Amino acid sequence: MNASWPAAGSPEEAAAWQALVARTPALFRALSDERVPQTVVIVPSLSMDPGELAKIKGVHHYEERMLVNLMLLRQPRTKLVYVTSQQLHPTVVDYYLAMLSGVPSSHARQRLVMLDCADASSQSLSEKVLARPRLMQRIQREIMDFDHAHMVCFNSTAAERTLAVRLGIPLNSVDPQHNHLGTKSGCRQIFREAGILLPEGFERLSTPDDIARSLASLKKSDATRRRAVVKLNEGFSGEGNALFYFDDDDSSYSETELAKRLLDRLPTGLRYEAATENWDSFSTKYAHMQGVVESFVEGEDKRSPSVQCRVNALGQPQVISTHDQVLGGPSGQVFLGCTFPAAEAYRLDIQRSGAKVAQVLADRGVIGRFAVDYVSVPDGRGGFDHYAIEVNLRKGGTTHPFLTLKFLTAGSLDLETGLFIAPNGQPKYYFATDTIQEDRYKGLRPDDLVDISVYHRLHFHGPTQRGVVFHLIGALSQYGKVGIVAIGDNPQQAKFLYKQTLQVLDEATGRRGRGQ
């Protein structure tokens, strides 16, 4: 360890961190000019609960999802330092560089530095970097000008704060001191302050007794209530949720007696979204990270829109995009993908709702990207009721698809319509998956995927601004996992390109006749 580095969590580190934070407004203003030389250090660490991450196969390959930021190399004076746990396959990096427009790939390559920890362990990437002082010194040597450099990460914790301090550059992400606002408990408080609709429920719970009493209270408040959802504070993609079904006679008991009966049913009565979850592990994590109990929003025509926002370094809240999420899992709570933009019937409604949340977070001092997720059901008057259920104070499954569209087309969101408009005036749409996993995809190397894509003319075509972009390519050969962003001129075209891609992959791996 360098003797000049303050100890993690020390007052000296806190002072150094605040000094970096104070530099961000001036840095933001300076970098509004794309010609200003800058260095961006990308550390795509998934710094989350290890038990939750363990549910995801090939989770270290998710570090690839931020490769879309290589599109920043279209700015002629920008240098990127991209750090990963293990060395990425060269074809994966080439795939993104090939999509750069207006810049020769050789020019971009000279401004890209790929570094890795040579470490496949389950430890978070940021912790791996912190454990390698020589690697940190190498990163520092690659920084052109410390006054015009910053670090980008997937989510920010104390580890990312320590890393930013030791590198001596600001972190372009939410300050870890605000992370509690993005927990399942914290976001309910934010929704109330914003004055928006949220499911009836209880937060900051930790014991089985807390869960049972909350479930009993929900049932007694509405005898017709059929289900409730129990959520880990720090679960993500719906994998930390469990559903509880009430019995028909539960409403006949007093609230106290019902709580006792529900407590006995908890070990066998929860239906987990994660196939590997059980009561012992769930209750242990619940005690450690706390959680919430909420009414499960029922509805025949249920939607799951999301609005992406950010608060820039000047403290200004902004709406970035809207999506309709594609959900799956046992009860439809696991994120599988998204369509952009959200449905015309309500995209402006959730833009307005998201703007209220963004303003509250800005008032709290939050800076960075985040998303607000909703469950929406018809209100009986021709519109929808939008129940806010979660704030993700980090980049998420809808971040990289939108950045892909933005970087490839150089368009922008029209807040008046909620549509993304390319420079030629054409609205653009996409259908994106978080991941697709098929055993028969195993063994397909990155080179094979690129060959298949190019041969079948699926690859994104710059002149028409239509086509398919893959992500999570490195997970394909071992895990049979890959992600798809299908970009079109209308929703039908985007969905067609997605289905065509699945059909091509099926045929290339020996399966025919996938249902539409």
Image (tube, rainbow, N blue to C red):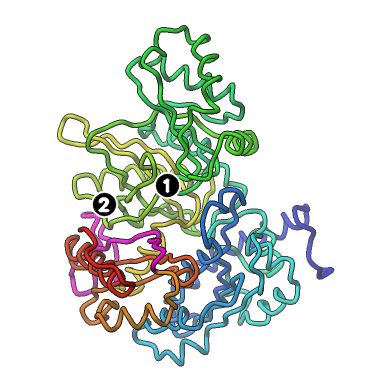
Q: Residues within 10 Å of mark 2 (few under 14, many from 20)?
A: many
Give the secondary structure at mark 1: helix
Residue 504 falls in image quadrant: bottom left
The residue that disc 1 covers is 358
Residue 418 forms part of the magenta stretch: yes
In this picture, residue 238 sits left or right of residue 365: left
| Vertical comparison of 266 with 144: above or below | above
Residue at image x 38%, y 32%? 198
Residue at image x 39%, y 88%? 103
Tell me residue 433's x, y (percent). 35, 60
| Vertical comparison of 202 with 106: above or below | above
Type of amino acid at the residue the image marks with label 2: Ala
The residue that disc 2 covers is 342
Q: Nearer the viewer, residue 319 or 50?
A: 50
Which residues are the magenta region? 411-440
Type of amino acid at the residue the image marks with label 1: Ala
Tell me residue 430's x, y (percent). 27, 63
Residue 414 forms part of the magenta stretch: yes
Tell me residue 121's x, y (percent). 66, 64
Q: Residues within 10 Å of mark 1 (few under 14, many from 20)?
A: many
